[in-house]
Image: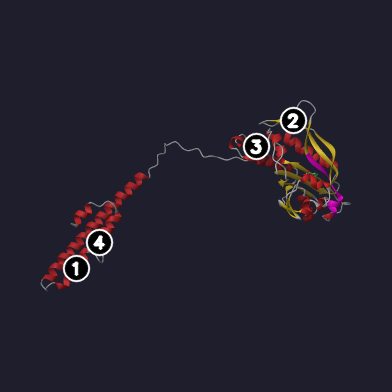
Amino acid sequence: AAEEKLSQLHTVQSLEDIRIRVLGKKGELTQVLRQMGSLSAEERPVIGALANDIRTAIENSIAEKRNELLKAEREQKLKDEVIDVTMAGKRPQIGGLHPITKVLEEVKDIFLGMGFSVAEGPDVELDYYNFEALNIPKEHPARDTQDTFYISDNVVLRTQTSPIQVRVMEKSRPPIRIIAPGRVYRSDAVDATHSPVFHQVEGLVVDKGITMADLKGTLEQFLQTLYGQEAKIRLRPHHFPFTEPSAEVDVSCFVCGGKGCRVCKGEGFIELLGAGMVHPDVLRRCNIDPDVYSGFAFGMGLERIVMRRMNIDDMRLLYENDIRFLKQF
Ligand code: PHE
């Protein structure tokens, strides 16, 4: 009966079940051997020998069957795992860099090439760094123009990257040459040219004998590398509380496409940055002597540069992350 059962088995596990049922501690054959005690002295050796023979026979056929099943299972496994190398592959989806990231990398590269390094500051900023240290005290009208998000009385979401100037000047001594990119926050409604969160790139140079000519030369070099050698820049007088004198910087009209930018016909200029010579009071507050050192600073809106550079006419496209839009860059 045992032999017959074995021939019907198909897996190693069910074979093991059978082995336990027949030969195990409570198995059928073991039960038979236990009852040997009730046999007579003449019967015992005969039955004992017979039972042992049967046990050996069953053990042998189980072992044989086991090998047979293991081999079959191995073969099946190999068959299942065969790889069809001729099957068509799936093309992996590869992401790309966001246009803002791309242009920021370009901007960083240009300034790194001019010997600048990159600094950072916190998005959640003390009122002191965002305003006070930049000559914008509590009642100053310049605060109104920046629609500040207040976290508490003396903590704000930074409205500009200029507080990083102060943090850098507090920590390091001239010569200083840094740019500081980052997000800035203003309570503006969203439209084609405004967003409550946008990016600025700040620049700061402090050393002995720095003049307005250095400011103009640096920005000209930067904008011509970004927009092409024909780009002209123009400084217009302006006012910022933390620079004196201050200027707004325009670049001559240009159009950009996939391959780069070229200057428009006609005489138009486009406003791109705020800039100026670091105010002596700002230097003094950071323990830098304005009688020995001078510096210039500038700040640009990154989205504006990106939109010009990539020919994008609505700022919202930069934040919606529509893959059909992003794929074009
Ligand atoms: N922080 C100014 C702004 O947000 C720009 C600026 C930076 C002006 C540095 C002068 C110097 O408008």
Q: Is residue 124 visible?
A: yes
Labelled pair 2, 4 in contact (Cβ < 8 Å): no
The region drawn magenta spans 273-284
Tell which circle, 3 or 2, labels the residue nearer the N-terminal end.
Answer: 2
Labels 4, 1: front one: 4
Crowding at dot 2, Cα within 10 Å, few <14 / some 14-19 / many 20+, comes out as: many
Q: Check disc 2 and report the residue beneath it.
A: 254
**Amino acid carrying mark 3 in the image:** Leu
Quadrant assignment for the N terminus: bottom left
**Farthest residue in the left direction?**
42
Labelled pair 3, 1 in contact (Cβ < 8 Å): no
69 horizontally vs 293: left or right: left
2 horizontally vs 205: left or right: left
Label 3 to label 1: alpha-carbon separation: 86 Å
Q: Check disc 4 and report the residue beneath it.
A: 21
| Image location (x, y in percent) of residue 163 | 77, 50
Labels 3, 2: front one: 3
Q: Check disc 3 and report the residue beneath it.
A: 317
| Image location (x, y in percent) of residue 25 | 26, 66
- Ligand 1 shows up in the quarter that is top right
> Quadrant of the rendered structure where residue 29 is?
bottom left
| Image location (x, y in percent) of residue 195 | 70, 41
Tell which circle, 2 or 1, labels the residue nearer the N-terminal end.
Answer: 1
Label 4 to label 1: alpha-carbon separation: 14 Å
Label 2 to label 4: alpha-carbon separation: 90 Å
**Amino acid carrying mark 1 in the image:** Leu
Tell which circle, 2 or 4, labels the residue nearer the N-terminal end.
Answer: 4
